Image (cartoon, grey):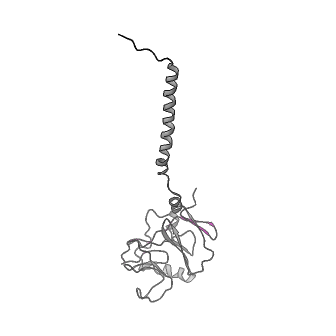
Amino acid sequence: MVQPSSPPNPGRRKFLTNFTGFLGAIGAFFVAIPFLSAFKPSARAEAAGAPVQVDISSINPGEMMIVEWRGKPVFVVKLESSAVKLISQNLDRLADPEMESPAQPEYAKNEIRSRKEGLAIITGVCTHLGCSPKYYPNAGSTDFDPDWQGGFFCPCHGSKFDLLGRVYAGVPAPTNMEVPPHYFAKDNILIIGSDGVA
């Protein structure tokens, strides 16, 4: 019986085996890059969730600015002094003036639902079916309310909200409009999408 002969150069075989394994590992790394990059959010997705900076110095009392954040409209309303008085006199028409969801920022759980008096910052989405309510700032008789005090009306199903986004009683919308996280970087620079806590 013939014994198999040992390879003429065992060091060379070991080197080639290790080198082939090394090249295979490099190839696997480059093949994995596209798969791993698929888990990273796109620049568009990152921008959609990023905070938005808004200069509100051009808003006059009674006017509203609409800002997009996370694909939703955010209403920034500068209230007139006469409207601020009506807000506190309109409480009996609201479903629950104190109602706030637990998810609302702590600074929105006050009478003005904001960090700054005279400014309402609310997500412009009806809490009934997600429509966007229309802004009717002037008090007076309207087609949908003979004693309108100013606020938001959703023509889709008739939900009504006051100027701070608080829901009226007896309408389809079950809760107040949400207050997004926000803070003021400077007096007229509003940041929507962050509460300013690092």
Q: Residue at x 53, y 65 (%)?
A: 107
Residue 183 place in picture, x, y as percent: 58, 65
Residue 26 place in picture, x, y as percent: 51, 38
- Determine whether 5 is above or below 48 in the image: above
* Viewer-nearest residue: 118 or 96: 118
Instruction: Give the mark count.
Output: 0
Tell whether position 177 is magenta: yes
Residue 48 place in picture, x, y as percent: 51, 63
- Where does the C terminus fall, quadrant-wise? bottom right
- Determine whether 49 is above or below 39 in the image: below
Q: Residue at x 58, y 71 (%)?
A: 116
- Where does the N terminus fall, quadrant-wise? top left
* Viewer-nearest residue: 88 or 189: 189
Residue lying furthest front in this view? 2
Magenta stretch bounds: 167-191
Tell whether position 60 is magenta: no
- Determine whether 18 is above or below 172 in the image: above
Residue lying furthest right in this view? 186
* Viewer-nearest residue: 74 or 68: 68
What secondary structure is the magenta-colored segment mainly?
Answer: loop
* Viewer-nearest residue: 53 or 137: 53
Residue 180 place in picture, x, y as percent: 50, 66
Q: Residue at x 47, y 73 (%)?
A: 124
Dividing the picture into quadrants, the one containing residue 84 is bottom right
Dividing the picture into quadrants, the one containing residue 58 is bottom right
- Determine whether 82 is above or below 4 in the image: below
